[in-house]
Image: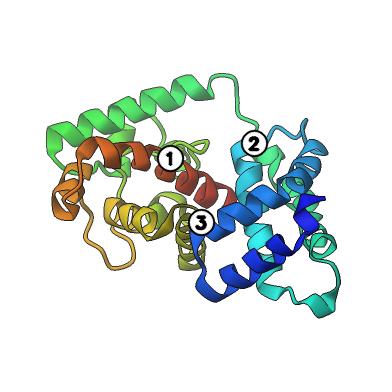
Amino acid sequence: MPATDSKLLQNIEEWKRTKNPNTFNEIYKQLRPYVNYTKSKFKNSGLSPTVMDLEARKLIAQALENYSPSKGGVVTYVNQYLMKMNRFVNNNQGAVRLPENYSLEFSTFQNAYNDLRQRQNRDPSTLELADYLTWNPKKVEVFKMKAGGTVMETDLSYNKLYGAEDLVIKEALQFIRSKYGNEGELLISKLYGLNGEPKQSLNQIAMELKQSYSKLYGLKQKVDKDFKEYVNYSTL
């Protein structure tokens, strides 16, 4: 099969040496049949294909970091890591089942958040949101921390929103770098004030990097979605 030829081994050695995201993407394509087979076992789990791909990429990266020819065939070794998907699914499939009215309530919550922020020119507090919505403050906190994988554009930062540990943020940024390169990691860091970068709007970032807003917006849509998915499911 294509994934067992010498090109795969060459790509693995190159990626371990350079950590080039394009090389990792090529490896992932070569291993995709095995990823798809693993994902097919959990098609009724309720987890989205994006989430499954994120976890598969994470497991493959871990496998490649630890692989050496002395450990046997690379495909067999990677498949052993992909078997860990079973634990991931068992731990998370129940956590993503939401009440029927969740989408409506989250839409109400998001509209309230954006309205208050626009009026006050700052992020609203939990108590301000609770008063605006006539909700219990604890309910507001739940919506702020576990928003079904959707995060407001204007939220303070991922570690505050999700209660994620620094390690989760670091892993998420590493994942973004492996998939989108340094440009993707820098974009996320500037959008959310991570990695020591000041928090900036997309327009400010475009001006600083001397790139068109439309080009960065297209990248942001993809990178931001993956970053949100990674952090959300790493902290469930």
Q: Element under label 2?
A: helix
Q: Residue 5 — which label?
A: none
On screen, 194 above or below 123? below
Tag 2: residue type? Pro
Q: Residue 222 — which label?
A: 1
Q: Are marks 2 and 1 in contact (CB under 8 Å)?
A: no
Q: Element under label 1?
A: helix
Q: Picture coordinates of residue 22 (x, y %)?
A: 51, 56
Q: Is residue 223 left or right of residue 6?
A: left
Q: Element under label 3?
A: helix
Q: Point out the tag, 2 or 3, that comes first from the N-terminus.
A: 3
Q: Picture coordinates of residue 46 (x, y %)?
A: 70, 32
Residue on which the image places disc 3: 22
Q: CA distance from mark 2 to mark 1?
A: 15 Å
Residue on which the image places disc 2: 49
Q: Is residue 21 left or right of residue 202?
A: right
Of the two numbered discs 3 and 1 in the rendering, the one whose residue sits closer to the viewer? 3
On screen, 126 above or below 14? above
Residue drawn at the location 48% of the way across and 41% of the way down: 142
Residue found farthest to the front:
6
Quick one: label 3, few (<14), some, or many (20+) residues within 10 Å?
some
Residue drawn at the location 76% of the way across and 54% of the way down: 3
Q: Is residue 108 left or right of residue 119?
A: right
Tag 1: residue type? Lys
**What colour scheme has been applied to the protein in the rendered image?**
rainbow
Q: CA distance from mark 3 to mark 1?
A: 16 Å
Give the image quarter of residue 131: top left
Tag 3: residue type? Asn
